[in-house]
Amino acid sequence: MWRRRFNSIAGPTRALTEKKWDALVVGGGHNGLTAAAYLARAGLSVAVLERRHIIGGAAVTEELVPGFKFSRCSYVQSLLRPSIIRELELVRHGMKLLKPKVSSFTPCLDGRFLLLRSNPEQNYSEILKFSKRDANAYPRYEDQLHKFCKLMDFLLGSPPPETLYEVSSFKDRLRDKLKKSVFWSRFLRQVLSLGQKDMVDLMDLLLSPTSKVLNNWFEMDLLKATLAGDAIIGSMASIHTPGSGYVLLHHVMGETDGDRNIWSHVEGGMGSVSLAISKAAREAGAHIVTSAEVLQLMVEDSGKVNGVLLADGTRLYSSVVLSNATPYKTFLELVPPNALPDDFLRAIKYSDYNSGTTKINVAVDSLPLFPCCKLDHPDVGPHHSAIIHIGCESMDEIALACQDAWNGLPSRRPVMEMTIPSSLDKTISPPGKHVISLFTQYTPYKPSDGSWEDPAYRESYAQRCFTLIDEYAPGFSSSVIGYDMLTPPDLERVIGLTGGNIFHGAMSLDSIFLMRPVKGWSGYQTPVRGLYMCGSGTHPGGGVMGAPGRNAAHIAIKDIKRRLS
């Protein structure tokens, strides 16, 4: 029943092939669905083509163990742009956010724990148990990040001021220059509002290793390690890697109901986000098709896209195609190689798609109990609704876990973010039982000591994670009913994430803003006329954000209107 709710048209139908579409969207992930919604609201005929039997891409809910519904890839929500929630009326379409009672919980083996909330007074008291200096510094640290987020809000909602390649007339060129001038003048006003000191601090954050940033703020290793988790999510970067501070900022830019850096669960799992967006798209007239794998984009000799060829031989025609696939998948697998410049292909091919992430979804018959936490009891406690940091007691632990992967080995003591969505959401598990999400790092794509295709090797890594959790929550392993594991190759094969990278490509400083996906092509247009990129491989990057889809749709709509006029 759950899967049927997420399906639309089961495969291409005659109605899809009997017309030329205004726009086709390759991939039914949340960004592709967002783009389709805005295109359809502009009065265009739109069809979304999803390879899998279910829509959502990485933001998907699947019942992999009978009775247990997992957010199979992405697992908490914060980054989805408020403008999209408002404009597409996602709450009306069924998206319900469940705010945690506690934002972060880090247990320790020596009996201590760190519990962070959204309440400044409670955080002060909690951190004061360890360090008065850090208790005083923490609100200043948060205030600074929130100040930087205001600048980032402007960038997130704006397409990069890239050169538009379909501009031909003098009037269009003048309009393009004016548009870029307006962008940079608005950006300059934002920068000036920060002041020189804050701008220097922002540059320090963006360019520095996370370890340097946090060492400058705090003395308590437990607090630093807890905060450092946001800087390594989904990457193979170390906390000592220069520029890792940007990913730290990227993960605090989100909000829930106006509250910054609050990561909420979604009732029904993350697939409910995609379902709500798809409802908005369908309401506007978009068609969403599942089990429709795109084999190749059809490109005319003139270099203009003309539609798509599906794996079953079906041809769908349109002069506008938006790809929600990764840049690598789009340009090296879907676009005919002779349709692209060599330098562009090289830039795409040699972009960083590395990932150290393995996602494990676990069904358990009892709630994990943490003896270190005095709030613990058999029922759900506030800390169970938090992001629980396992193996994050010190900065050295995180650095060693990364070094293992750099040496080709899955981390001996993986760094994990554990969430228990069923602590707040009673719709995803049977009574008394729970859904556990484990976002684990670091795991290389090709381990040097084995293969992810070997069932015994896979099992050994899962048991390594469960055993580590046992150290903090005794008996966890024995509570496991079943689990699903997605290693980097699995994330590539199942979800379509090149290299297993959850962001469609690294979020390093050489791959953001005007450099994303590659220099010279950050404006969602591509060297193939009529082909646009709308996925996380474009600005402003990864996470369940929706901004790439919204921005790309607006660019495509403007181009279509320009051509028609």
Image (cartoon, helix red, strand yellow):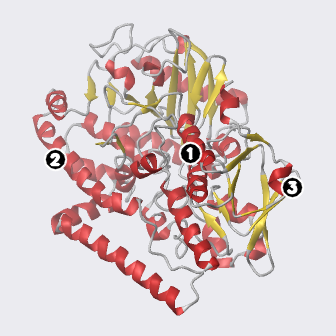
> Which residue is at 25% across, 34% downward?
118
In the structure shown, which secondary structural element does the residue marked by tag 3 occupy?
loop
> Which residue is at 48% across, 62% downward?
539
Q: Earlier in the sequence, mark 3 or mark 1?
A: 1
* Label 3, residues with CA under 10 Å away: few <14, some 14-19, many ≥20: some
In the structure shown, which secondary structural element does the residue marked by tag 1 occupy?
helix
- The amino acid on which the numbered mark 1 sits, given as a three-letter code, is Ala
Residue 324 point in image, percent of width and height: 63, 55
Residue 445 point in image, percent of width and height: 62, 46
State which mark lies toward you, 2 or 3. 3
Query: Along the line of sight, which residue is nearer the eye, 94 or 234?
Result: 94
Marks counted in the figure total: 3
Query: Along the line of sight, which residue is nearer the eye, 558 or 359?
Result: 558
- The amino acid on which the numbered mark 3 sits, given as a three-letter code, is Thr
Q: Is residue 288 visible?
A: yes
> Which residue is at 51% across, 58% downward?
550
Q: Locate residue 44 relative to residue 294 in the image: left or right.
A: left
Q: Locate residue 154 relative to residue 460 in the image: left or right.
A: left
Quadrant containing the N terminus is: top right
Q: Earlier in the sequence, mark 2 or mark 3?
A: 2
Q: Measure the C-alpha gap from mark 2 to mark 3.
A: 58 Å
Q: Which residue is mark 3?
A: 314
Q: Is residue 243 above or below residue 173?
A: above
Residue 537 point in image, percent of width and height: 55, 59
Q: Which residue is mark 1?
A: 280
Q: Is residue 212 above or below residue 490?
A: below
Q: Which mark is residue 140?
A: 2
Q: Is residue 19 above or below residue 187?
A: above
- The amino acid on which the numbered mark 2 sits, given as a three-letter code, is Arg
Q: Is residue 217 above or below residue 530?
A: above
In the structure shown, which secondary structural element does the residue marked by tag 2 occupy?
helix
Instruction: Indicate the quadrant where residue 509 lies.
Output: bottom left
